[in-house]
Image (spheres, rainbow, N blue to C red):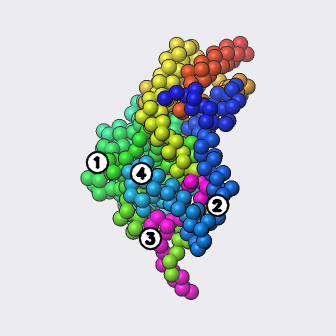
Amino acid sequence: MNPTTIRKDFPVLDDETLVYLDTAASSLKPRQVLDAMDEYYQKYGVNVHRGVYNLSYVATTKYEDARTTVSNFINAAFNEVVFTRGASSALNLVASSYGLNNVKAGDEIIVSELEHHSQVLPWQNVSRITGAKLIYVPLDEDGRITVDNFRSVLSDKTKVVALNYVSNVMGYVAPIKDIIRLAHEVGAIVSVDAAQAAPHMAIDVKDLDCDFLAFSGHKMCGPTGIGVLYGKRHLLEAMPPIEFGGDMNDNVDKFDASWKEAPYKFETGTPPIAEAIGLGRAIDYLQGIGLDAIHEHEVELRDYTVKRMKAMADIELYNPNAETGIISFNIIGVHPHDAITYFDGDNVCMRAGHHCAQLVVKWLDVPATLRASFYLYNTKEDCDKFLATLERAIAFFREVGF
Ligand code: 7TS
């Protein structure tokens, strides 16, 4: 894998002064993906599933081909892949359709403080409406979800387990396969938030045996406005739609209607056609490079950077031993929102804040963190530029007084 060649695929990186370390928020998009979407708009930009003419047939075929690409990517069946607006809407679909129809007062839903708001707030809503209880897995001293801690909250009352595969703040990989096996032993279903996993590591939903799994296109070289919900066939079949309108229906009478089969009953209205095609191309692009090689590259950059950061005074590192390309830290005594402006001045893009995961930032007992995240287009030079800015930022804040 050669990041220097890869960088040439990303038009935003034509600006050679730019150091992009905010992939966990959204990745950059390669020309191949932009071209595939442009081709849709330029050559056959019509609606799907309805036109009885050749252009519409071409659009429908490309849209459904993208579903095949996604299903192969995660080892699902074609009709187990629902296109959504993103990971957030996929996770909301699980809670609003499966959750509200299967969970009742007295049941328990297991979540954690390591979740993105998109995984925990939909289940808070289910809990409010149904009277089911939210239970938090205690995190270990590093802030990890462990199998033992998960076991300590699992019971016969557990109906749903809603956890992340990779944390967007700590970059930890959860022991999700073991969690799924244990949850199934008590008859609970598991909804996996894979928004930070799918872009960086190979996923096999059959091997994991998860019931639901969600991710977004825009964090994996694809466009915004498209995401995926994988659901086991029998679960999707039993779930009611949560949005009603065009294309999702079968027969419509004055006071009643019937729905198409999954996944179509969940894809109301004109879908994100160009975006699905773009996501399919993004997956081809990532697989062409190899998910294992991408993961290895990110970890190498992370280890290189963390080693240098550990040698610096005035740095608080929150996840020194994470196994993915995410570094969460603060400059001691400096509010991250002050620090981030210094990085911006050097054209180093990172995120400062609670990363839409306030519970873990509260668990860390800090107002916010700085977060650098790596992807396939980052290089050792990016790490060096980031470290040089960091050193100057520390010197600057030391001079003006922490
Ligand atoms: N789950 C996780 C673990 C995430 O990191 C994110 C987005 C989402 C769900 C929601 O994805 P969306 O595409 O629907 O927005 N995380 C971040 C982040 O860390 N910084 O900006 C967005």
Amino acid type of the residue tagged 1 in the rendering: Leu
The dot on residue 72 is 4
Amino acid type of the residue tagged 2 in the rendering: Tyr
- Vertical comparison of 89 with 26: above or below: below
User: Over which residues does the magenta segment extend?
Assistant: 252-277
Query: Marks 3 and 4, how far apart in space?
Result: 20 Å
Q: Earlier in the sequence, mark 2 or mark 1?
A: 2
Rendering coords of residue 231 (x, y %): 41, 58
Q: Nearer the viewer, residue 352 or 292?
A: 292
The dot on residue 135 is none
Amino acid type of the residue tagged 4 in the rendering: Asn
Discs 4/2, front? 2
Residue located beneath label 1 in the image:
182
Query: Marks 2 and 1, how far apart in space?
Result: 48 Å
Identity of the residue drawn at 66% across and 51% down: 38
Query: Marks 4 and 1, how far apart in space?
Result: 26 Å
Discs 2/1, front? 2
Query: Marks 3 and 2, how far apart in space?
Result: 27 Å
Residue located beneath label 3 in the image:
261
Identity of the residue drawn at 54% across and 59% down: 63
Q: Quadrant of the C terminus?
A: top right
Q: Is residue 244 visible?
A: no
- Vertical comparison of 284 with 79: above or below: above
Does the CB distance between marks 1 and 3 fall below 8 Å?
no
**Element at label 2:** loop
Q: Earlier in the sequence, mark 3 or mark 4?
A: 4
